[in-house]
Image (tube, rainbow, N blue to C red):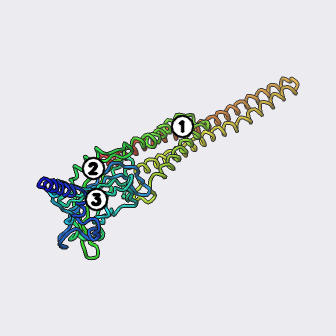
Amino acid sequence: MYLHCLMFSLAFGWVSATGNCSYKRLMEHLGLNDDKIQKSIRPVYDSSTPTNFYVDLFVTSISDVNEKAQSISTQVIYEAGWISEFIKWNENEFCETSKISLEKDKIWIPDIVIAESIKTEFATMENPYVKTYSSGFVYMYETLTLTSACKMDLINFPFDVQTCTLTIHSPMHPSDELTLDTFSDSSFLTSSSQKAFQTQGEWELLSINTSKSNMSSLGYYEDQLIYKITIKRRPLLYIITFISPVFCFLVLDVASFFIDAGGGEKLSFKVTLLLSISVLLLILNDKLPSTANEVPWIGVYCSLIFILIGISILEAILVNFLMAKGEQIQSSEAPLDSTSAVTDSVKDFNCTSDPASDRNDNQSHVHKNSYTAGDENRAERRCLYWTRAARIVDVIAMILYIITILVFLAIIYNAWFMASVTSKV
């Protein structure tokens, strides 16, 4: 009989211990099965006690930066945690169970939003669980695909550095009910994000800085966490596709001054260069926003080179006009000489030989030849005058053109490249 009682007591104790070790028993102890109040009110026993909410944002990739729409698409890891006074237990009473995973719809979760968000989605699927510890600490982890507004300064494009802001706040809970703070400092967020960065695209992550502020709304103050994400563009693609080709077009335009201005090859070559730059300007127009307050330096660079080549085309047209003017004067004198020569030969063929008349004809022929030679000399001098004027204009224009280009490139270098280096520092 004693043995049966001992076996019964051991079996009852084992069942009791097993029941306390189950998650079901723990959830019943916490009142999470049927208690709907826990997920609708702030988890504090004293309403004057604020709930401390901790957040960390890690940027793992930058999928798109839309300059025209002034938006940035990123993938971020969102970690959050807070203390729930309703969800606490003694580990010793539940077989040293220190944590448990709960469904989100069973507990209270703060209404946290990102002010700059345009579109927020879950990267794969929403994590349906949160992890709860015996101390009452609730931990939440999500991977989000976030498209947010970002005001960009494109004056130094493509050597620009942009700073985008993500502001986290609760629209329904003032600061005396919900306080916001970060788990980690800025250096840890930056280093962890750079290590987890998954893309090697156009943009490079420089830093993530955090700050805290208050915002007044309807007479109440709300806590705000501000994440400033600083990114730098890798300019190699734009150097290859925009800056270098336009500079090569400029060098070719300078070299075109050594093409013979007598034909039309020089003018057609310059027009081809102008059309090539216009195509690059159209491509650049699709990339940059049309509502920018300041014109980016790359737009100034391409536009001024476009204007310089246009001016060189006008100079080529002027030189061609002067050369054509000289050729026109020379060709207008040539028919007169040929006509007089033909008349003399006809007379020699039709007239009979008369010594007296031959002497007169010879004298008159000498006078005509002297007059013809004088006319030819005058025509040649006039032709040389226009040709010399065309060459002088061409040389002076080339010298002024080269000086203008050197001054322009020096100004662009100081205002564009040096400014971008200063902004990076």
- Mark 1 or mark 3, which is nearer to you? 3
Quarter assignment of residue 375:
top right
- The one nearer the camera, 395 or 222, is 222
Q: Is residue 91 left or right of residue 304?
A: left
Q: Residues within 10 Å of mark 1 (few under 14, many from 20)?
A: some
Q: Is residue 125 visible from the viewing direction of this image?
A: yes
Q: Position of residue 185 (x, y in %)?
A: 20, 53
Residue at x 26%, y 76% (from the top left corner)? 219
* Amino acid found under the numbered disc labelled 1: Arg
Q: Is residue 66 left or right of residue 378?
A: left
* Amino acid found under the numbered disc labelled 2: Ser
Q: How far apart are marks 1 and 2 (CA)?
A: 59 Å
Which of marks 3 and 1 precedes in the sequence? 3
Secondary structure of the residue carrying tag 2 is strand
Q: In this view, does 376 lie to the left or right of 270?
A: right
Residue at x 53%, y 44% (from the top left corner)? 274
Residue at label 1? Answer: 391
The label on residue 102 is 3
Q: Where is residue 164 in the image (x, y as percent from the top left)?
A: 33, 56
